[in-house]
Amino acid sequence: MQQLIAIILAIACIPILLKRKLTLGPTLLILGAGAGLLGGLPLAAVGKAFGDVFLVPSNLSSVLVVIEIGMLSTLMTHYGILKRMEQALRKLIPNAKLIVMLLPAMIGALQAPGGAALSAPFVNRLGTEMGMTRAQRANTNVVARHFLMLFAPFATNMVIVQAAVPGVNVLKLGLLNLGFALLDQGAGYLFLVRKTKQVPAEPVSGGERVRALGEFLLTFSPILIVILLNTILKIPFPLALIGPFFLVFLLGDKKEFLQWLGKSFNPSLATMIVGVYFFQNIVGSMEELLALFGGLIGGESKVLFLVMVAVVGALFGLATGLMYLPLGVMLPIVAAAPHVNEMALLVDLFYVFIWCFIGYFFSPIHLCQLLSDQETGSTVGERYKTYLPLMVTMPILTVGLYFLYSLLL
């Protein structure tokens, strides 16, 4: 319980320190260390949590990927590549309200930490034309970006499900998740986009539309090549991201490329991602907290199961800004319980998956959200005020779909 209280206090203090003009990176480093010590971790464990950001290959890889994607976004913006992509897409699809959600979803196929930075400038620019507030622009980017990750078999968290529960049919689970994903996107459109201004579209001939398709594929190629190199050739993301830099060099005017490559490195972003992973490592080091969460969802009562999964999944996701950590703890426990058939198990796994997603999605250290806020200038208060309808809708959809699936399947 001591560790749970420490984490809750740390999360509650994030907006307080941000209001004192501390940037997010130092804020998370301070609160992570404070939560660890208050939660009873020895100083050596806190030091290890920080060292593991750089010494654990998966953590270091994620840090490098976020930095690289931030640099790539800066270069693609500077050389006008993102603007060309936007213009081509607007000729292909004359509905700005559809485009503002479609492009982040497409870029969301890039299953890499920090990928939201690539679509954020586009959503920020088009959303400004549409009369969106800063928070609407930031939140639309995040909502749309997470469409594919909820059900695509290649999505990182779906792979984690298969690893945590060997033998589970992820295609069937993906279909259950797709129901939530579609309704979630609809809710995002309803609450964030529907009432915004429609940007007038110029008439486009058939020939112009064909050329626009070629232009879109060309400007989208730096992102597409990363997906292909990583998913097909299995090249690690930090190395796969070298290819896009070369493509940006070819697509841009090549003026002062090396100087802009150096300028594209953002020390504030680097500090932020280090702070995020340090905080996550602190939570991952709290064995008593992990055991507490595991015990809470291990009961036999169905009502208690539904309540505890919602509480633990949401709280765990909020505390870590991750899905894989709560999924890794909760899925094996749920899978080990008796189920009457495969579909009953899948419905329970769906419920766990979505509650972990909800906690992660609304986490104050959700990396995609932080990057989107950084691009748009949205504040924490603005973000959550704009999210209020979704904070109510997403849990209702989850519980409603659970009972619907239970009845139908």
Image (cartoon, grey):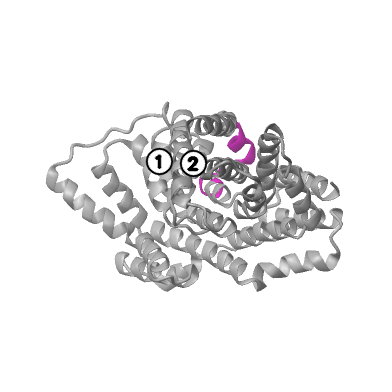
Q: Which residue is mark 2?
A: 143
Q: Please say if 398 is above or below 216.
A: above
Q: Position of residue 287 (x, y in %)?
A: 78, 57
Residue 189 occupies which quadrant of the picture? Answer: top left
Q: Which mark is residue 9?
A: none
Q: Position of residue 94 (x, y in %)?
A: 26, 37
Q: Amino acid at mark 2?
A: Val
- Circle 2 residues within 10 Å: few <14, some 14–19, many ≥20: many
Distance from the alpha carbon under mark 1 to that under mark 2: 8 Å
Q: Position of residue 191 (x, y in %)?
A: 48, 29
Q: Residue furthest front?
A: 340
Q: Is 384 part of what is drawn in magenta?
A: yes
Q: Are marks 1 and 2 in contact (CB under 8 Å)?
A: yes
Residue 145 in sight here: no
Q: Main secondary structure of the magenta part?
A: helix
Q: Secondary structure at mark 2?
A: helix
> The magenta stretch spans which residues?
373-385
Q: Is 55 part of what is drawn in magenta?
A: no
Q: Which residue is mark 1?
A: 101
